[in-house]
Image (spheres, rainbow, N blue to C red):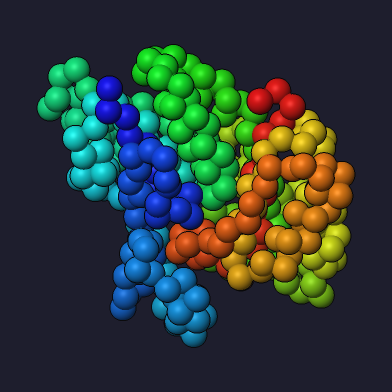
Amino acid sequence: MKYKIVADSSCNLHSFPGVDFASVPLKIVTDKKEYVDDAGLDSARMLEELAVYKGRSGTACPNVGEWLEAFGQAEMVFALAVTSSLSGCYNACVQAKGVYEQSYPGRKVCCLDSLSAGPELVLIMEKLRELIGRDLGFEEIERRIREYMRHSHLMFMLESVDNLAKNGRISPLAAKTVGVLGIRIMGRASDEGTLEQMHKCRGQAKALQAIVREMEAQGYAGGKLRIAHCFNESGARELQNMLKGRWPQLDTCISPFTGLCSFYGEKGCIMAAFEDSGA
């Protein structure tokens, strides 16, 4: 069987070694310019331009045709989308599945609503790659990956929520105090895939400490950890070191945001995806 993993660009990866893979780019759009979240995007320049832009900005999800193009000629596809509570990516993916399976009888597509974003998609992709490498059947991989997704989680820290508020992802009222006097929002991706604010913290150090506490409350006990950041590698390293102090052999890595997560997370944002003890 020819397996393929397809994910939208909220995963912050444009390549994924060890398996056939395609990234489907979202777009960041203004009245004057469109930024395609692919390997050619300069996220730093995009943020600089958006910081001085006074008009409207938002995002556009991949359409059905773009998902179909990413499926290519694979016999079996596992397609992963940013949480459906924030984007229409998953719905477009499901529509593409219907077209693909009707056009190619015998081929199969599994559409997965991550209920999350960023590094949690990476955890799911890594598990899919592992399961595919074990030569399991399509239905068994789907069963196991859906079970695994019950044990993966995402925490985040935000220094600014301007773009989230402007695009209706959080309330403008909740956005007003963030960034004032060093206030950071610490939160998580809820079980429903929404952005759930948990704490307002004075300064980055306290926000990172809150992330560690909440990770342990969610059942973290030294499982896989994937950290991503928006031009805040020092903060990501600080979080990593806090956790490595307790679990020295921790399987962890740090990576930068690409376009979509940079737009919504903004500078300073950190996301931490992890497995709980049931994974």
Q: Residue at x 19, y 30 (%)?
A: 100
Q: Is residue 74 left or right of residue 112?
A: left
Q: Residue at x 42, y 47 (%)?
A: 16
Position of residue 148 relative to residue 228, above or below, is: above
Q: Residue at x 71, y 31 (%)?
A: 276
Quadrant for the C terminus, please.
top right
**Residue 266 spot, x, y in % from top left:** 58, 67
Quadrant for the N terminus, please.
top left
Q: Along the line of sight, which residue is nearer the eye, 225 or 159? A: 225
**Residue 26 spot, x, y in % from top left:** 36, 56
Q: Quadrant of residue 39?
A: bottom left
Q: Is residue 132 left or right of residue 205?
A: left
Whether residue 218 appears in this view of the structure is no
**Residue 132 spot, x, y in % from top left:** 42, 26
Q: Is residue 96 left or right of residue 267?
A: left
**Residue 119 spot, x, y in % from top left:** 57, 48
Whether residue 7 appears in this view of the structure is yes
